[in-house]
Image: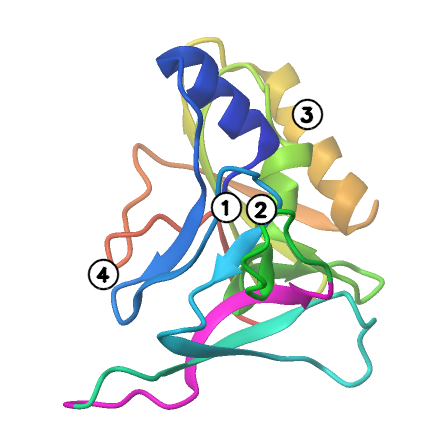
Amino acid sequence: VLTGEGRALIESTFGCAVVDRYGCREFAVIASECDRHQGLHVNAENLLLEVLQDPAAAPDSGGEIVITDLKNYAMPLIRYRSRDVGYLTSSRCDCGRGLPLLELRGGRTTDFLTALNGQKVSGIVLATYGITNIDGLRQVQFIQERRDAVRARIVRGPGWSQEALDTLIAKVRAFLGDAMAVEVEFTDAIGLESSGKYRFTISRL
């Protein structure tokens, strides 16, 4: 997920505008921005995008994105579960294209941690607003296997200290609950998934 901070950093570094897009191997480009940057335009000419939402959830909380390919005649994919979380907005872009606009809501369905009060917390939200700017933190991965505990796998870099660890734990508890147990595991590297992706949070509940 492209954050506002990430967009600003890329634009200032390369001196050009950044255009966000959402896609996967199975469908290529699913949705993308135009030059107005008012949301991700769904590629509705080539695919049908639906959002499966929990009936008990708030209307704008989002749900799992499922996709049906309208142009794959050799091997049709029907209501393919992406495991990504998003929301189809009711607004329209000023560009006039009229395509549905998609908002991504913080990663994949398996990338949400559960707070002590039962609330789901997005790993993207935790990364963006929780643990940024901690000195010496090179890489981290959170794994939750119990409702009352989360394991933090940490790759330390120059400048790491006990103060940095205390800050990380305090920020995690600010999102997941003051009594949440944070188990720390130091490691030399955090490997990628078989897909080639790095998972910031993993829920095994």
Evaluate if marks 2 and 4 touch, with contact meaning CB atoms under 8 Å apart: no
Q: Is residue 76 left or right of residue 94?
A: left
- Seen in the image, is 4 located left or right of residue 27? right
Q: Which residue is mark 1?
A: 1
Judge depth for marks 1 and 2 and give the one in front: 1
Q: Which residue is mark 2?
A: 124
C-alpha distance separating marks 1 and 2: 7 Å
Q: How many callouts does the rendering have?
A: 4
For label 2, the crowd category at 10 Å Cα-Cα, with few meaning under 14, some 14 to 19 and many 20 or more, is many
Please state the horizontal and vertical placement of residue 64, each as a whole percent of the image: 57, 74
Q: Amino acid at mark 1?
A: Val
Measure the alpha-carbon separation of dots 4 and 1.
Answer: 20 Å
Alpha carbon separation for disc pair 3 and 2: 21 Å
- Of residues 48 and 111, the one nearer the viewer is 48
Q: Secondary structure at mark 2?
A: helix
Q: Name the residue at 56% across, 36% down.
A: 3
Which residue carries the number 4 mark? Answer: 194
Image position, residue 7 (x, y; %): 51, 28
Q: Is residue 158 above or below residue 191?
A: above
Residue 166, numbered label: 3
**What secondary structure is marked by label 4?**
loop
Q: Residue at x 55, y 50 (%)?
A: 151
**Colour approach in the figure:** rainbow
- Which circle's residue, 2 or 4, is located before the other in the chain? 2
Choose the circle earlier in sequence order: 3 or 2.
Answer: 2
Q: Are marks 1 and 3 in contact (CB under 8 Å)?
A: no
Tell me which label, 1 or 2, sits earlier in the chain.
Answer: 1
Q: Are marks 3 and 4 in contact (CB under 8 Å)?
A: no
Asked if residue 77 lies in the magenta stretch, the reply is yes
**In this rendering, which labeled residue sits more in front, label 3 or label 4?**
4
Element type at mark 1: loop
User: What residue span does the magenta drawing correspond to?
Assistant: 74-90
